[in-house]
Image (cartoon, rainbow, N blue to C red):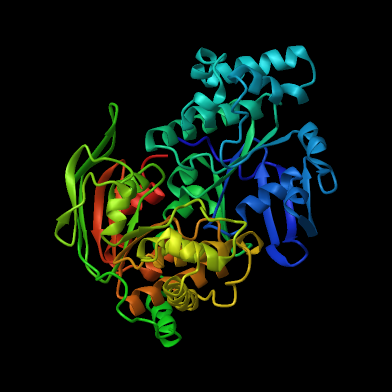
Amino acid sequence: MSAAPSRQAAAPLLEVRGLSVSYAGAVQALDGVDVAVPDGAIVAVLGNNGAGKSTLLRAISGMLPAQRGAIDAGEISLAGLRLNGLDPAGIVRAGVVQVPEGRRIFTDLTVEENLRAGGLAAADRAARAKARARVYDLFPILRERRTQPAGLMSGGEQQMLAIGRALMASPRLLLLDEPSLGLAPRIVEQIGEVVQEINRQGTSVLLVEQNAAMALRVSELAFVLEVGRVSVSGRSEELERSEEIRDRYLGVGAAREARAASAASAPAVGDGRSAAAEELVVDGLTVRFGGISALTDVSFRVAAGTTHALIGPNGAGKSTCLNVLSGVYAATEGRVLYGGQEITGLRPHRVAALGVSRTFQNISLSAGETVEENLLLARHRLTRAGFVSAGLRLPGARRERARQLDRVREIAALVGLEDRLRQLVRTLPYGDRKRVELARALCAEPGLLLLDEPVAGMTQEESAAMARAIEVVRQELGISILVVEHDMGFVMSIADRVTVLDFGRLIADGPPEEVQRDPEVLRAYLGGGER
């Protein structure tokens, strides 16, 4: 990709000055943020989960009230027009259109019907026809599939449709929220090229991304948010080479300090009931879906009793690897051994029976039940009482339930949930629900814990609480932990060793301090090629 010439000196199209935002009148999400988008430029906003990136876009597009958010201070203007106070429809008419995170298209409607919905804000039929022609020129695949239901399209095609639908309103400023999320590297590259082409055609772009390599490569200016404030800003090509940016995205941070604090405050509950930690060996793992290779000859080891991170840009193959380890996907080639026993090809319940437990990126809890009931459910595999004796509440079943409840309470205390046991899951803050999922996985008494994006969507405070909980769990229970995560500060604060994937291949494996400096890792995360 090659970026357009810098327009840093051009008059701002969008100006955000002193913006402060809170949710429910209590949670401060942005604090005095200043961001400017020059007319005709691509500007990137970077930052980890919970930094305030999506909140910034919601404030600009007028979508804060839908999330119980409000602007407490500051001003947002587009070419001199004050956007504060306008409703979302008015902001669209002013020329600002957002593409939300997660490819939120109308899955039951066809491609053409989705585009028609996006064109409702167009001035007239001629404007809609011109916009549609532009979309089909940018995304020929959408023309080919214009009569196909959008829900049957691939993730990359759905992202193209989401962008195309926004372009139907012919915006002056396009807001893109994580367009690369969950897409394969090849598709991410295409999305980046399309963003540049949209810009060349005269549309300014404000791009929110965790994929720093793509965002810095296509943009001219960048702002880095940290805990609701702009911590760094400047020309993208300069930030790409900045040691400060490399530290933020790949830095070790206060890793060992977090461990020391966790150890000092750890409750003593290690009683040997968890399965004994064993070494995990991934040997020559290859996974293909049709003609597409998601993993190619990947090998690494997770030493018993350690915390091991598996990282990489979107589409690198991390979730595919985790799905093979837990028995969800079958390996095309290679093998996986846990404790010397091959588990390649075993069904998920057989893998779990060997002492492997897992959490998922998207929370999967019984929201209408209490925390205690969710944790008890995870101990079903360890329960000896049969269905009849439990239903009749026979003495033996009652005694066993009491023992299971004791263990549930110990594990809840281990991750800081002891005062949440009687609460319904749906009433808990997001960070607490993620810790409930961690506790539920632990209630199966695993020797190996697989964590899939444990801090995705969390604030910095929630991420720190999760890091402390994971370190306490590792130390007190002596289990092995393999964690997949995008938040590099979090990863480097808890991992003993790090394996890095890119395009389905292993590019680095070693201690965090070595991986941080590895040229291939820097290239994968921050780019550094020709602009």
| Residue drawn 63% across the image and 50% down it | 54
The answer to whether 68 is drawn above or below residue 410 in the figure is above
Residue 525, how many percent across, how many down?
Answer: 39, 50
In the image, 300 versus 344, the foreground residue is 344
Quarter of the image containing the N terminus?
top left
Residue 2, how many percent across, how many down?
Answer: 45, 35
Residue 62, how many percent across, how many down?
Answer: 76, 45
**Which of the 4 image quadrants contains residue 27?**
bottom right
Number of numbered discs overlaid on the protein picture? 0
| Residue drawn 81% across the image and 45% down it | 83
Tell me if 133 is positioned left or right of 197 in this view.
right
Quarter of the image containing the C terminus?
top left
The answer to whether 17 is drawn above or below residue 477 in the figure is above
Tell me if 288 is positioned left or right of 339 in this view.
right
Tell me if 201 is positioned left or right of 78 in this view.
left
List the single residue furthest toward the right.
85
- Residue 271 seen in the figure: yes
Residue 225, how many percent across, how many down?
Answer: 58, 59
The answer to whether 300 is drawn above or below residue 89 in the figure is below
List the single residue furthest toward the left.
340
- Residue 15 seen in the figure: no
In the image, 287 versus 316, the foreground residue is 287
